[in-house]
Every structure is written in C-alpha cells, then in structure tokens.
Amino acid sequence: MIRVTLIGSGNVAQHLIQAFSKTTDVDLVQVFSRRTEAVTHLVDSRKVISDFTKLEETDVIIIAVTDDAIENVSNQILLHNQLVVHTSGSLAMTALHSNHRRGVFYPLQTFSKTKAIDFKHIPICLEAENETDYQTLENLARVISEVHYRVNSEQRRALHVAAVFVSNFVNHLYQIGDDICTENHLSFDILKPLIQETANKIMTLSPNEAQTGPAKRQDTTTINAHLSFLTDANQKEIYKLLTKSIIDNGKKL
Amino acid sequence: MIRVTLIGSGNVAQHLIQAFSKTTDVDLVQVFSRRTEAVTHLVDSRKVISDFTKLEETDVIIIAVTDDAIENVSNQILLHNQLVVHTSGSLAMTALHSNHRRGVFYPLQTFSKTKAIDFKHIPICLEAENETDYQTLENLARVISEVHYRVNSEQRRALHVAAVFVSNFVNHLYQIGDDICTENHLSFDILKPLIQETANKIMTLSPNEAQTGPAKRQDTTTINAHLSFLTDANQKEIYKLLTKSIIDNGKKL
C-alpha cells in the first residue's frame, strides 16, 4: 500500500484523486486544497486540508498545481526528507525545494474537467533524484497505468513541446475545419471519421508513411485552388506555411 | 441489385472494389484499368478491360482516377445517357462531359494502399443532376456505408479544403512530434495515447471546448520557454503562427 498526499484541485489533481480512489493499492492520506469544496465531491472531507502545517509524512507528496505555483507550494512543505514530486511537463525537477527528495510524476495527457478519462493507457513520465524513490514512483505509476517511461527533465521539456504540436495545435486545426464547415452550411460530423482514421493510421504507420494530400504530391493545381478558395487571411497563412513544410520535408528524405 | 462499372486502379478504386465485392447488392460488371495487373488480385480478370470501346451500359460508371485525368476519361466514355460519377473532392460535377447524366460519389477518407479500411463509417458525399440518379447513388452509398450526405460542388470544395486541415496538416504535426522525439531519444509511442485522446475528445466536445494548452491560457512564460527550446526555424515559425491563431481565436469569442 502506497501512502500518497495530493496537493491541488485542478484538472490533473481531480483525475489523479479519481484514479487513486479506484484502487486498494493506494492510501490517499490527505488532499490539500485552498478551495475545499473543489474536491469534497471526490474525497472524504476529513482528508481535505487547507493548511500546510497540517501535512503529514507519506510515501510521496504530489504537487498537482499550475506551473507558476509549484515553487511556492514546494517551499511551504516543511517536512524534511520527504519525497515530493510535481506533475508538470515544462518544469525541471529542480524547481522543487532542495530540502525535499525530489521527483516528477508527469501524466502525458490532455485533461478536461468535463470528460472522464481512463488512466490505464496514459503514459506516466517518471524522474527521481535517487533510485529508491524512482522505484516508489514506478510502483505508484503501475497501480494506475499500464505505461510509464523514465524521462529526464530535458527530455520532458521536449515531450511537452511535442505534445503542444500533436495535441493543442492539432485541435486548433480541427477548429479551422469546423469553421470552414460552418461557413459552408456543412455539419462538422462529416469530418469526424476522417479525423479518427488520421489518428488511427499512425498507430501502425509512421507519420511519414501516413502522409497524403496535395502538398505531399506537390499537386500545385489543387494547392492553388485551395488558396484561392480560402478568404480568411489567417487560414491562408497557415495553409501556406504547412504546405511548404510538408514539401520541404519531402525533399529532406 | 445495382450494376456498377469502376474506372481506375488507384487507392480509392481498390478500396471501392473491395467494398463492392463484399456485398451481394452490387454487381460489379466491369473494371477498367490500363494496368490490368493492378486489379486482377481483387476482381475476376474476365471483368477487367483496358479499352474504352468495350464499356457496357450499367446503372452507374464510377470514375476513380486522379483529378487531372477525370475530364479525359469522361470524354472517352462514348455511351449516351449513361450515369457517370467521379470520386473527387476538388472537382465540380460539371468537370464530367455533358453527354452524360452526371453525379459525384465522394468518400471522405484518407486511403493508403497498405492499410485496410472499413467503409461502413466513411461518409459518402453525393450529388447528381437529377433526383432519380441521386436515388441510385444514395442506394449504392447505403450498401457500403452507414453515412452519406447531400453535398453540392461548392460545399464539396470547402469540405476538401477542411479535410486538408484536419487530416493532411494534422498528420504533418504528428511528423513534427515524431521528429522532436527522435532528436531527444524518446519513443514516438509516448505521444500516441495523447494523439488518440485529442481525436476522441472532439467526438463529444466542440474543438473550441476541447482546446487546451499554453496558447489557450495565454501562458506567455511557457510559450517563450518552448520557443527558446525549438532550434529548427521551420518548427519555430509553425509554433508562432498556430499560437497566434489560437490566441486571436480566443479573442473573437
């Protein structure tokens, strides 16, 4: 049984509370939240604290708060020789106070409060200052997920940037597709099977093998027809830049 | 039973042959291919022709060839009062010869020869000059797919542009994610669950509701950290443009 403390009440914190509550291998000892009401629907209210001096020693304290609050929260944990980890993709492990045994427990996923998620397939990226603590984190990761990776701070930073491309930016391209449909009185539903298949394809093909379309074929007739169809300056600029990038990429190979 | 002729041997043609072969509601009468060997693994070789004068009248002739060859192929079909359709997302119905009863049968999906596909969930976009022919196309679409839409030529053009954004460009962003992983000795597999969830999210949320990330939060600290992390000029430019587009989009709402 791994004894865990969770600090935070945002998306990641709430999803972690739910994942830990589902298993008997984790004892969620305390949840720290300034806004107690944000978590009491998920955890016994007697476990919820909002005073840092009430923190008890546990196997691991997980700080699941926004990046800019992590350092401050870490400084307020007065327990010594306590394993403290954060869940951030961008921050180095050393953002945590050096009084702690430090580590990182970063679940690489896009969390929305409104959408339930199954932790089982979420890769958890782990890092720790010493091997014993790494083992603790690995055991904890195994309880909630089938996949975890050893990822150092520099690699995690790369991963976070890559995640912005394949998730945040991808979703924005969905948004543009939605906008084009709306302008032309078409349902965005028409595009959904294509979106699914595009994501499914790279489960078995590399993105390079999976690439199709006018830019890949260097089909300038279609590219020019599309550019003259687009009236929105921003959409046009994105079309041009990504088309150029696909063509240049083809030349590199 | 709908009697069908197929012209072409590329990705779309091959997938259509396979879909038609699976059902007893379609009689695939002839397949025209200049390179007979490209389709004989899929269809009885006695049905394969490579001479336009041998084309028989059927309920519908489907021209599934590249955009730039459609007009020429259409001109070579000498049958009169024959329903002839193309499968192109970009071309207007009127690209077909006016001697024919004209229509469009456009399956909106990304096809790779190396990856099998289930037609059942592929939206088929239909258009015809007259209502009787539209019914024939609708009956044919129903045989292979659960979803079809009435889409005119102008709307189909919009859809094709939207498809480039949500599929071809999205796949290119996967490619950039893959490149960043490779440079940092990380497996692209780490990103796959995130890619899946990003595509799954918009099945229930609108892209606007699903948007997350530093640009959405206008988190300039993280944005600047990412920009200084990226060394590739092209990746940097794409990051900047899409970030700006997400921020501007937030302001419009």
Image (cartoon, coloured by chain):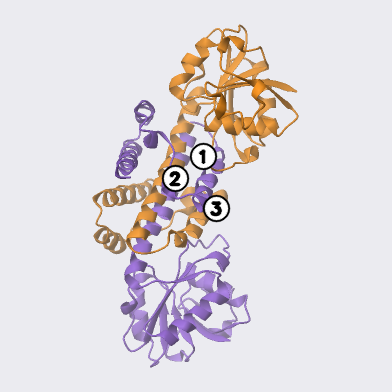
Chain colours: A purple, B orange
Q: Which element type, helix, strand or loop, lies under badge 2?
A: helix
Q: Which labelled disc corresponds to residue B156? A: none
Q: Quadrant of residue A24?
A: bottom right
Residue situated in front as seen by the camera: A210 or B135: A210
Q: Does the image show residue B230?
A: yes
Please indicate whether residue A106 sits to the left or right of residue B184 in the image: right
| Chain name for mark 1 | B
Q: Amino acid at mark 1?
A: Ser
Q: Amino acid at mark 2?
A: Glu
Give how far across and how far down residue A248 sits, in percent: 29, 41
Residue bearing mark 3: B200
Q: Does the image show residue B97?
A: no
Give how far across and how far down residue A112 sits, in percent: 50, 61
Distance, label 2 to label 3, CA atoms, is 22 Å
Q: Is residue B189 above or below residue A198?
A: below
Q: Kindly report which numbered mark, 2 or 3, lies closer to the viewer in this rendering.
A: 2
* Residues behind callouts 2 and 3 on a single chain: no
Q: Amino acid at mark 3?
A: Asn
Distance, label 3 to label 1, CA atoms, is 22 Å
